[in-house]
Image: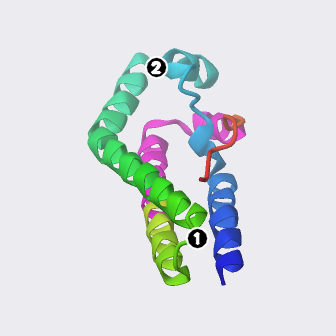
């Protein structure tokens, strides 16, 4: 049972990371200037994208903090040979938070799609995502 839970904890984040690869298309070090150059964004588009991200900032920060805490709690539970039911419950919590993260990313991309031209959306789809995301 614990082995299958561990496998699920490793596989689910990887699937989510690769399924929504554009999530890393905006490396933190690149910023708006790089995105503007890569996609040929106008100043108005850059401002609209910044507003979109700013409108989600509090939710994103809270969600990432909750996910970080849940992952750490799960990791500690596993390493302390915790009860299988407790591990399963914590795993479900992490998965639920990952789902919320995916949903927020979907909302962000949908908002950006409304801002970008069809050509810019094509360019965005071609950008390589940043490095791998940490799962636990």
Magenta stretch contains residue 116: yes
Residue at the image position 57 percent from the left and 18 percent from the top: 34
For residue 74, above or below residue 87: above
Q: Spatial distance from mark 1 to mark 2, Cα to Cα?
A: 54 Å
Disc ID at residue 42:
2
Q: Quadrant of the N terminus?
A: bottom right
For residue 14, above or below residue 59: below
Residue at the image position 27 percent from the left and 42 percent from the top: 58
Disc ID at residue 54:
none
Closer-to-camera residue (15/84): 84
Identify residue for label 1: 81
Residue 48 located left or right of residue 78: left
- Residue 42, position in %: x, y? 46, 19
State the SS at label 1.
Answer: loop
Residue 72 located left or right of residue 78: left
Residue at the image position 59 percent from the left and 16 percent from the top: 37
Q: Which residues are magenta?
A: 99-126
Q: Is residue 59 visible?
A: yes
- Residue 92, position in %: x, y? 48, 74
Colour logic = rainbow
Magenta stretch contains residue 104: yes
Q: Earlier in the sequence, mark 1 or mark 2?
A: 2
- Residue 40, position in %: x, y? 57, 21
Closer-to-camera residue (80/132): 80
Dominant SS in magenta: helix
State the SS at label 2.
Answer: loop
Residue at the image position 32 percent from the left and 38 percent from the top: 57
Of badges 1 and 2, the one in the foreground is: 1
């Amino acid at each position: 049972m614990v082995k299958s839970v561990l496998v699920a904890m490793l596989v689910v984040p990887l699937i989510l990371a690769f399924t929504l690869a554009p999530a890393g298309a905006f490396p933190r070090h690149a910023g708006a200037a790089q995105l503007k150059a890569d996609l040929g964004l106008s100043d108005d588009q850059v401002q609209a994208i910044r507003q979109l991200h700013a409108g989600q900032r509090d939710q994103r920060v809270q969600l990432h903090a909750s996910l970080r805490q849940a992952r750490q709690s799960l990791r500690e539970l596993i390493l302390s040979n915790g009860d299988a039911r407790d591990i399963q419950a914590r795993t479900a919590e992490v998965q639920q938070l990952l789902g919320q993260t995916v949903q927020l990313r979907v909302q962000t991309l949908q908002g950006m799609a409304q801002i970008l031209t069809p050509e810019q959306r094509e360019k965005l789809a071609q950008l390589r995502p940043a490095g791998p995301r940490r799962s636990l």
